[in-house]
Amino acid sequence: MFFALMMRAYRHGRKLKQTYDRCFTEFFQRYVSGSNEHRTNPCEQLHRAYKDCVEKNLIQNKLYDIDIEELRKEVLNTR
């Protein structure tokens, strides 16, 4: 449910998310197959760009009355 809200919160972020999903799926398949090609996530920059896009939209548009700082603190255990 939370993810569905995020996707609606920033529709322009879909392309970023799709790109990240493809990257991570390819990475994860190689990682679990034992390939030593990547030991760190090569998709981290894509994930950060997508996350920043969604957070920026949540902060600017105050969609769904989501307080990003409360979300970080209560749900993500960060900050």
Image (spheres, rainbow, N blue to C red):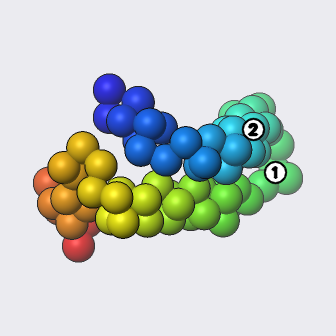
Give 51 or 64, whichever is nearer the viewer. 64
| Above or below, 14 relative to 56 | above
- Label 2 neighbourhood size at 10 Å, few (<14), some (14-19), many (20+)? few
2 relative to 30 in the view: left or right? left
Quadrant of image for the N terminus: top left
Which mark is on residue 36? 1
Q: Residue at x 59, y 49 (%)?
A: 13
Quadrant of image for the C terminus: bottom left
Give 17 or 65, whichever is nearer the viewer. 65
Which mark is on residue 22? 2
| Above or below, 64 relative to 46 | above
Secondary structure type for disc 1: loop
Q: CA distance from mark 2 to mark 1?
A: 19 Å
Which mark is on residue 48? none
Residue 61 point in image, percent of width and height: 34, 58
Residue 22, image quadrant: top right
Give 75 or 37, whichever is nearer the viewer. 75
**Nearer the viewer's eye, disc 2 or disc 1?**
2
- Label 1 neighbourhood size at 10 Å, few (<14), some (14-19), many (20+)? few
Q: Are marks 2 and 1 in contact (CB under 8 Å)?
A: no
Query: Can residue 52 be spotted in the picture?
Result: yes
Q: Residue at x 60, y 63 (%)?
A: 49
Secondary structure type for disc 2: helix
Residue 32 point in image, percent of width and height: 69, 34
Residue 50 point in image, percent of width and height: 57, 56
Give 58 or 36, whichever is nearer the viewer. 58
Of the residues shown, which amino acid type is indicated by label 2?
Answer: Arg
The mark that comes first in sequence, 2 or 1, is 2
Of the residues shown, which amino acid type is indicated by label 1?
Answer: Asn
Q: Residue at x 48, y 38 (%)?
A: 7
Q: Residue at x 43, y 59 (%)?
A: 57
Residue 2 point in image, percent of width and height: 32, 34
